[in-house]
Image (cartoon, helix red, strand yellow):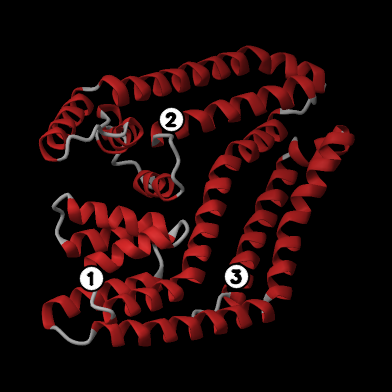
C-alpha cells in the first residue's frame, strides 16, 4: 500500500518540486540581477563614487556598494516589503554581516527544503508527511544559524560594552571630543563593538545627523544597554552636563546588570535544559521510529485519529514550552 501511494504521489510531487525549483531560481537570479544591474543600484554607485572623488579621491569599496544596493535598492525586493517578517529578516541579515540579500536567502531556503524533500523521499524512502517534516527542519537551519550568530554577537557586545563606556569616559576626561572618543573606541576595541562604532563615526562624517547615526547603531545592535547609552548621549548634547561622569555611572550600572543576569542564568540553567530536552525528545524519537520502522508509524501519520493526536500533542507541547520559557525568562 505504501509503495502504491508513493507511486500515485510521484506525478504531482515531481510537478511541485519542479515548480518550487523554477520559482526559487527565478527569485535568486532576479535578485542578483537587480543588485548588480538595477537602475537604482547603478544610480547609487554613481552618486557615492562621485561624492568620494570630489571629497577625498578614495575609491569606494565594491563590497559595501554591493551590500547597500542589495539591501536597500532592489526593485524586486520592493515587491516583498509588505510580507510579514520580511523587514525583520533584512535586519537580521544585516546584523550578522551576511553578504546575502533577503531574497537570495529565501531562495536558498527554498532550494534546501526541496533538496531535503527529495533526499528524504528518494534516498530514505520516507512518506510525504515525514519527508515534508524533514525538509522543513533542514530549511530552517540557515535561519536558526543566523539567529544564533546574532544572539552570540549581541552577548559579546554587552560583555565588552562597560569597558567601552569606561574608555570613552576617560577619553572625554582627557580632553577629547565626543566624536573623537567614539572613533577611538571603534579603533581600539574588537568586533562587534569596534565595527559598530566605526560605522557610526563613518555615518557622522558623511553628514548624517548625530542623533540619527546613534539611533541607527541602536537599531542594528538591539541591546537595552546601548539604548540607555544612546538616550543619555542625545539628551546630554541638547541639555549639557558632565558626560564623562554620566558614562562612568552607566558603566557601573551595566556591570551590575550583567553580573545579576549571569547569576540568574546559572540558577535557571536546569529549567532551561529541561525545556530543551522535553521539547526535542518527541521529535527525535518520532524521526528515529519513522526512519527505522516506517510501518510502525504509518498508523500515526496515515489515519485521521493519529493526525488528531499529533495536532493535540503539538499544541500542548507549544503551551508547555511557552510556560517554561516564561518561568525561566527573568528580565533584569
The numbered disc on residue 104 is 2
Give the residue number, with chain letter if any, for mark 1: 178
x, y (%) of residue 298? 81, 35
- Is disc 1 placed on a helix, strand or loop? helix
The structure residue drawn at horizontal position 56% and vertical position 79%, both measured from the top left corner, is 261
First in sequence, mark 3 or 2: give its number.
2
In the rendered structure, the answer to whether residue 276 lies left or right of residue 34 reads right
Spatial separation of the CA atoms under disc 3 and disc 2: 32 Å
x, y (%) of residue 164? 41, 71
In the rendered structure, the answer to whether residue 277 lies left or right of residue 230 reads right
- Is disc 2 placed on a helix, strand or loop? helix
- Comparing 47 with 134, the one in front is 47
- Comparing 14 with 30, the one in front is 30
Give the residue number, with chain letter if any, for mark 3: 325
User: Residue 252, located in which quarter of the rendered image?
Assistant: bottom left
* Residues at circles 3 and 2 in contact by the CB criterion of under 8 Å: no
- Comparing 240 with 1, the one in front is 240
The 10 Å Cα crowd at callout 1, few under 14, some 14 to 19, many 20 or more, is: some
First in sequence, mark 1 or 2: give its number.
2
Q: Nearer the viewer, mark 3 or mark 2?
A: 2
Amino acid at each position: 500500500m505504501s509503495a502504491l501511494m508513493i507511486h500515485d504521489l510521484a506525478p504531482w510531487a515531481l510537478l511541485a518540486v519542479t515548480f518550487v525549483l523554477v520559482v526559487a531560481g527565478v527569485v535568486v537570479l532576479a535578485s542578483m540581477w537587480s543588485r548588480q544591474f538595477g537602475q537604482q543600484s547603478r544610480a547609487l554607485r554613481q552618486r557615492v563614487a562621485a561624492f568620494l572623488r570630489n571629497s577625498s579621491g578614495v575609491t569606494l569599496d565594491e563590497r559595501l556598494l554591493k551590500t547597500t544596493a542589495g539591501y536597500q535598492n532592489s526593485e524586486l525586493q520592493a515587491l516583498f516589503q509588505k510580507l510579514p517578517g520580511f523587514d525583520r529578516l533584512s535586519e537580521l541579515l544585516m546584523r550578522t554581516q551576511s553578504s546575502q540579500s533577503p531574497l537570495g536567502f529565501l531562495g536558498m531556503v527554498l532550494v534546501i527544503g526541496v533538496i531535503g524533500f527529495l533526499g528524504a523521499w528518494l534516498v530514505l524512502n520516507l512518506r510525504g508527511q515525514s519527508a515534508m517534516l524533514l525538509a522543513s527542519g533542514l530549511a530552517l537551519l540557515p535561519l536558526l544559524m543566523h539567529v544564533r550568530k546574532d544572539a552570540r554577537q549581541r552577548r559579546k557586545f554587552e560583555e565588552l560594552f562597560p569597558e567601552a563606556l569606561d574608555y570613552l569616559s576617560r577619553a572625554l576626561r582627557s580632553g577629547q571630543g565626543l566624536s573623537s572618543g567614539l572613533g577611538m573606541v571603534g579603533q581600539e576595541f574588537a568586533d562587534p563593538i569596534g565595527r559598530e562604532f566605526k560605522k557610526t563615526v563613518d555615518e557622522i562624517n558623511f553628514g548624517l545627523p548625530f542623533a540619527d547615526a546613534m539611533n541607527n547603531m541602536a537599531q542594528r545592535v538591539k541591546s537595552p544597554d546601548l539604548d540607555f547609552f544612546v538616550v543619555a548621549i542625545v539628551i546630554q548634547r541638547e541639555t549639557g552636563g558632565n558626560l564623562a561622569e554620566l558614562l562612568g555611572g552607566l558603566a557601573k550600572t551595566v556591570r551590575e546588570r550583567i553580573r545579576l543576569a549571569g547569576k540568574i542564568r546559572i540558577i535557571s540553567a536546569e529549567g532551561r535544559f529541561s525545556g530543551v530536552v522535553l521539547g526535542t525528545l518527541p521529535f527525535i524519537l518520532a524521526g528515529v521510529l519513522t526512519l527505522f520502522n516506517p510501518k510502525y508509524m504509518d498508523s500515526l501519520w496515515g489515519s485521521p485519529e493519529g493526525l488528531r493526536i499529533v495536532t493535540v500533542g503539538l499544541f500542548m507541547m507549544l503551551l508547555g514550552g511557552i510556560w517554561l520559557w516564561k518561568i525561566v525568562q527573568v528580565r533584569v
